[in-house]
């Protein structure tokens, strides 16, 4: 198995990030969402390398096969972990693709590390620019929603993860866009994460303000979000990110839930491939979207 060292913990033990490295060509780094691991990118890992693209996907600290540290789940540290991946593998001309919580890592890396080694970025169902509802962010989500998440994790993390998985993909009595087998697989992927990492990362993505980070992005950018996303609502995230990055290509997937990397996997793969290989189409007029 392949690991990258991302510093040491308070006891001097190495922090190791597990990663997969597939294909050859200009590199793409996939940053997974919460509470999953890099394995959520199964359909992208099976497709993108077939198009002369090198694809790297790693497990965030505390998740998957990476070291379960006690702390370090703030975005500054997570952006530093991303830097360790890019530096250790000596990646250049990188396209960063961040899903949900991973979008925050993309934004923070671009500001904290000056976008070093990166040529393009993509935000997929991302938590940017700022999820929490405040006086100066009235479109955000009420603190009570995040308090309930934390309470449910502390009360019964397994039950929370199973319930959350259904919302993640928009599963209900009438709509079953993914199988029970897939939900079971996601539960297994999420439950191997540490309790502390699961809880602390929920706090980080719900309270971190990325508005200043987005202002530092000067490379071609792709934003994709589903308008049926109940986990990270379009109005609180995708719309606001597009406003902050008016030159970005902004694509709204009509009827798509949060977990569109599975429910809209073919469409997402096509859009990522187009962006990675051809670039970005500037919106005209500013503020318009491409509805699929």
Image (spheres, helix red, strand yellow):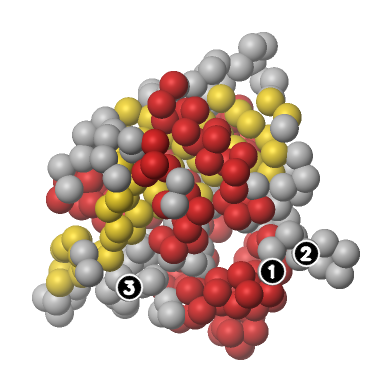
Mark 3, residues whose alpha carbon is within 10 Å: few (<14), some, or many (≥20)?
many
Is residue 185 visible in the rendered structure shown here?
A: yes
Per the image, the residue denoted by label 1 is 179
Residue at x-position 58% and y-position 85%: 158
Image position of 239 with respect to 184: above or below: above
Q: Which residue lies furthest to the right in this view?
A: 174
Residue 126 got which mark? none
Mark 2 touches mark 1? (CB < 8 Å) = yes
Q: Work out which quarter of the rendered image holds the N terminus and state it.
A: bottom left
Give percent across and percent down for residue 90.
Answer: 15, 42
Is residue 94 visible in the rendered structure shown here?
A: no
Please state which of residues 1 and 241 is positioned toward the viewer in this rendering. 1
Residue at x-position 69% and y-position 25%: 289
Image position of 275 with respect to 146: above or below: above
Residue 65 got which mark? 3
Q: How far apart are marks 2 and 1 (CA)?
A: 7 Å
Residue at x-position 49% and y-position 28%: 274
Label 2 secondary element: loop
Residue at x-position 43% and y-position 80%: 192
Per the image, the residue denoted by label 2 is 176
Q: Residue furthest left?
A: 12
Give percent across and percent down for residue 31.
Answer: 41, 52
Label 1 secondary element: loop
Between disc 1 and disc 3, the foreground one is 1
Please state which of residues 287 and 250 is positioned toward the viewer in this rendering. 250
Q: How far apart are marks 1 and 3 (CA)?
A: 25 Å
Q: Residue furthest bottom?
A: 155
């Amino acid at each position: 198995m392949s690991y990258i060292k991302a510093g040491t913990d308070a006891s001097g033990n190495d922090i190791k990030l597990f990663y997969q490295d597939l294909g050859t060509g200009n590199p793409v780094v996939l940053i997974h969402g919460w509470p999953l691991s890099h394995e959520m990118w199964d359909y992208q890992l099976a497709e993108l390398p077939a198009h002369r693209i090198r694809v790297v996907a790693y497990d965030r600290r505390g998740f998957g096969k990476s070291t379960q540290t006690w702390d370090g789940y703030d975005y500054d540290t997570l952006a530093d972990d991303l830097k360790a991946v890019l530096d250790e593998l000596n990646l250049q001309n990188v396209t960063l693709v961040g899903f949900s919580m991973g979008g925050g890592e993309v934004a923070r890396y671009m500001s904290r590390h000056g976008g070093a080694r990166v040529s393009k970025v993509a935000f997929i169902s991302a938590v940017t620019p700022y999820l929490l509802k405040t006086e100066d962010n009235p479109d955000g989500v009420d603190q009570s929603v995040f308090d309930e998440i934390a309470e449910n994790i502390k009360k019964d993390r397994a039950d929370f993860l199973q319930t959350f998985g259904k919302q993640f993909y928009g599963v209900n009595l009438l709509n079953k866009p993914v199988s029970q087998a897939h939900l079971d697989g996601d539960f297994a992927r999420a439950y191997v994460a540490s309790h502390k990492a699961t809880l602390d990362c929920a706090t980080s993505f719900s309270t971190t303000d990325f508005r200043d980070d987005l202002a530092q992005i000067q490379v071609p950018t792709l934003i994709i979000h589903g308008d049926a996303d109940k986990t990270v609502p379009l109005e609180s995230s995708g719309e606001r990110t597009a406003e902050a990055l008016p030159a970005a290509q902004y694509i709204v997937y009509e009827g798509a839930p949060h977990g569109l990397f599975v429910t809209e996997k073919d469409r997402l793969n096509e859009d990522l491939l187009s962006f990675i290989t051809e670039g970005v189409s500037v919106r005209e007029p500013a503020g318009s979207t491409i509805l699929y």
